[in-house]
Image: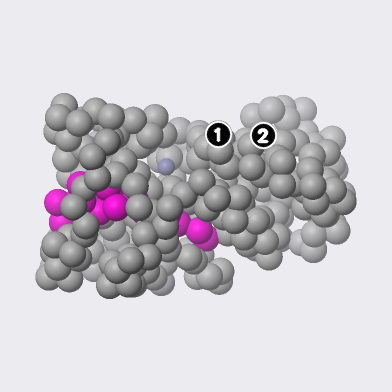
Amino acid sequence: MRKICFRVPMTMHLIFAVILVGGLSNCAAVLSDVNIFNDEDEVELGNRFSKEIEKDLTLYKRDPVVSEYIRQLGARLVRHSKRTNIAFHFKVVDAEEVNAFALPGGYVYVNLGLIRAAENEAELAGVMGHEIGHVVGSHGAKQLTKQLGFAALEQIVLGKNPNEFEKLAGTIARTGALMKYSRDAEREADAYAVRQMWDAGIDPAGIATFFETLRQLHKRQPGQLEQFFSTHPPTDERIQNVRTQIARQPRKPNLRKDSLRFREVKKRLPPPKRR
Ligand SMILES: [Zn+2]
């Protein structure tokens, strides 16, 4: 599908967008891949959405060693990503569900349950790399463009109606609508994850092995995977795509599967809460 991403001042965005939509006959298909935000606006939106979303989350701040490890692992992947010009924020969520998600503008949330479920660092990095991939592809911003349309975006982005933004952002944040990406976006995020991991020296096979780990876990504790499976079903197609992409990469010795630090962090995690 055609990639369209405007990199023009915000005041010009809507004008360009209207010209674009007016000039295309097949708008519906194209709209799913349109992003009218430039980096600065996307970051601003991310800031506002993160504040809304965090009203409903408990961030895990009790052990800075855990949050610092997640921040550093994320930063390492970001350094090898195609979006190094925005600041990413990695936060640990005190929740047992196996889940992670990203917001536009570089906000990535990792549940304690995900760290617990990953059998090695490469598996954790695979999920984080995938979420970073959604930010690299501006998938959240594109989703927003598709869902809200230009009139609502004008209200939100140009700040004409701040109260409306609060209401709308709250609804979008709580329904998880921002994280329901297209299959193309999911594929693209997987592909970005493989590339980032490979470049960072972490074994990208972790993405595929984590899918298998999850399938096993799902048999034992289906409830913990509900959220993750609803947005990221570990389908054979995804596993196959990842393995094919890895096979096409040049040989690289010493790709790291695990680290002492990962194992230490896992030992430091608080006992799982009963559901
Ligand atoms: Zn995804």
Q: Is residue 108 magenta?
A: yes
**Residue 251 at least partly seen:** no
Nearest the viewer among 247 and 106 is: 106
* Quarter containing the N terminus: top right
Magenta stretch, residue numbers: 106-123
Please count the marks in the image.
2
User: Which secondary structure, mark 2?
Assistant: helix
Spatial CA distance of label 2 from label 1 is 13 Å
**Residue drawn at (56%, 38%), measured in percent from left and top?**
174
90 vs 180, left or right, is: left
User: Counting residues from the N terminus, which is met first, the one under dot 2 or under dot 1?
Assistant: 2
**Residue drawn at (58%, 42%), measured in percent from left and top?**
173
How packed is label 1: few (under 14 Cα within 10 Å), some, or many (20 or more)? few
122 vs 134, left or right, is: left
244 vs 54, left or right, is: left
Residue 12 x, y percent position in the rendering: 85, 57
Instruction: State ligand 1's quadrant.
Output: top left
Nearest the viewer among 113 and 76 is: 113
**Residue drawn at (65%, 56%), measured in percent from left and top?**
48
Residue 72 x, y percent position in the rendering: 34, 72
User: Which secondary structure, mark 1?
Assistant: helix
* Label 1 sits on residue: 175
* Quarter containing the C terminus: top left
Residue 180 x, y percent position in the rendering: 50, 35
* Label 2 sits on residue: 147
**Kind of residue at disc 2:** Gln
Q: Quadrant of residue 79?
A: bottom left
- The scheme the figure's colours follow is one colour
**Residue 225 at least partly seen:** yes
Residue 177 x, y percent position in the rendering: 56, 35
**Kind of residue at disc 1:** Thr
**Residue drawn at (66%, 44%), measured in percent from left and top?**
169
